[in-house]
Amino acid sequence: MPESTRSQEPLIVIVSNRGPYSFTANEDGTFDIQRGSGGLVTALGALAEKHEVLWVASAMSKDDRAWAEQHQGTAVDVDDIFLRLITPRARQYELYYNVIANPLLWFIQHELWNIPRTPSITADTWRAWKRGYTAVNRQFAEAIAESIGDVQRPVIVLPQDYHLYLLPAFLRDLVGDRVQIQPFVHIPWPGIDAWRILPGQMRDEILTSMLKSDRVGFQTTKDAFNFVQNCRFYLPDVHSRGTRDTLFHGGKETRALAYPISVDVERTQRLVEEPQTKLLKSQLISVIGDQRLILRVDRIEPSKNILRGLEAFATLLDSYPEYRGKVKMLALLVPSRLEVDEYQDYLRDIMAQAGLFNAQYSDPFWEPIRVIVGDHYHRAIAAMQLYDVLLVNPIADGMNLVAKEGVLVNEKDGSLILSEHAGAFYELHEDALVVSPFDVHGTAEAIHQALSMPPEERRLRAENLRSVVQNAGVQHWFDDQVRDALAAFASHVSSSSTSSTPSANKSAASPTDAGAPSPTTATPKE
């Protein structure tokens, strides 16, 4: 889009640990570019049609790093999106990602630590906090500040998730109040007690940094309220003045708002029609035969509660033996963070329990549980079309898009069994069968209820669930956040501001543990 027609429009800055593209180096020095398939990337494609977008992320591979170094730190136009990759050193990234972000913060926010035993905050943890998490967050902030330069038009910075909690403070120190900073937290934000695991200094740095934002987005109003309560409880001189979504501190205010994320409805429906999906669907039909299908699709994460789901299925077979030989549980499990010990242990436990139950309940003609491990989205979409029951029973989940994808594409008026601790509960609970994730007996009874539900009730519930998802796709999620930021600019930014497009400079990667980059870090080209 020509700059002259976009001169008064905002620059949207997306910041995330993982970027929208991956790169593969060729022998001639060029790079093949692979666009990610996630909902965030897809939503951004629509956003880029309306606004100029800069995406700042970390190089994830050797070839990503080579691409960044080839462009000497500049933000490069890739498919109408300015992309800039920071390049923290390998050890620095390891401390930031695999010690602090995962598992420490992730386990706290999903309330999964076995508190009498873990975690232990050691000297190594503190080094990871300072030399890893803090340093990389600072690198992100400095890259953003230098990329936007001295532009006067509206700039909206949208940091994504728990990897970047310290970014708002660093960025605010660098750019002042001339940008809107609006993080979005994709995972649950728990109550006060969960956060007592962190030493006060770490916890206060996170909360104080987040309060440097203009507003903070969460999946649910419960998460937003928990954030407000945490700040009021742990930080001095922070007040809500009777509100549930606004914090007042040091003469400023920060809002905590719910922006429930969703799926790309049109893209998901297109995937149903792709040849690969149809082939996989036909193969699954052969596997299922005339059995009723109980499906779960999960990343291999302890929060997904896969073990209790298997136990609930075994309880169903004990309580209602008439289902033996007539139902099958299919678990499609996506590897996740297997470099973290807790995740490796969890996968071993899943496979052991599934094998034990198959040995206990199977006969020569019937395998009750099939577990398939692998990252294959087309297979998941194919299976979602075929379920009679979709089991989504996480202990804690920011949203859980499987619940939304499943009800969108299912062709059998299948029932959704949904944990009350999934973020999707707040949108889908009226027509789902709601369970406590800890109640194995109750989950087994819910499966029985779903399998024995009258066809007309199944149809009405399925239609209502599908309608909820169709009417609130992922584009609405981005649009709502941008709309609120622009409304704030309309109230606070002087109408006399002049616009410009950031210019491109060159830089070297940061050489210091503190994450301080070269003073000539890149900015998007005109």
Image (tube, rainbow, N blue to C red):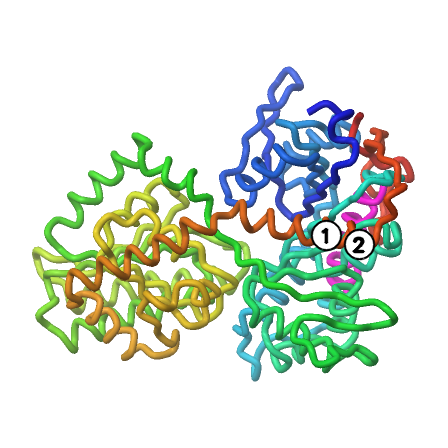
**Which residue is nearer to you in this view: 279 or 168?**
168
**Residue 121 percent coordinates (x, y):** 69, 74
Instruction: State whether residue 91 appears in this view.
Output: no
Magenta stretch encompasses residue 365: no
Q: Give the range drawn in magenta.
A: 127-146
**Residue 491 circle label:** 2
Using residue 285 as the reference point, say whether residue 101 is left or right of it.
right
* Residue 130 belongs to magenta span: yes
Which residue is found at the position 22% from the left and 57% from the top? 459
Q: What element carries label 2?
A: helix
- Between residue 477 and residue 65, name the one nearer to us: 477
Q: Which amino acid does label 1 sit on?
A: Ala
Residue 5 on image: x %, y %: 74, 27
Nearer to us in this view, 326 or 91: 326
Q: Which residue in the structure is indicated by mark 1?
A: 487
Residue shown at 29%/43% (left/top)? 382
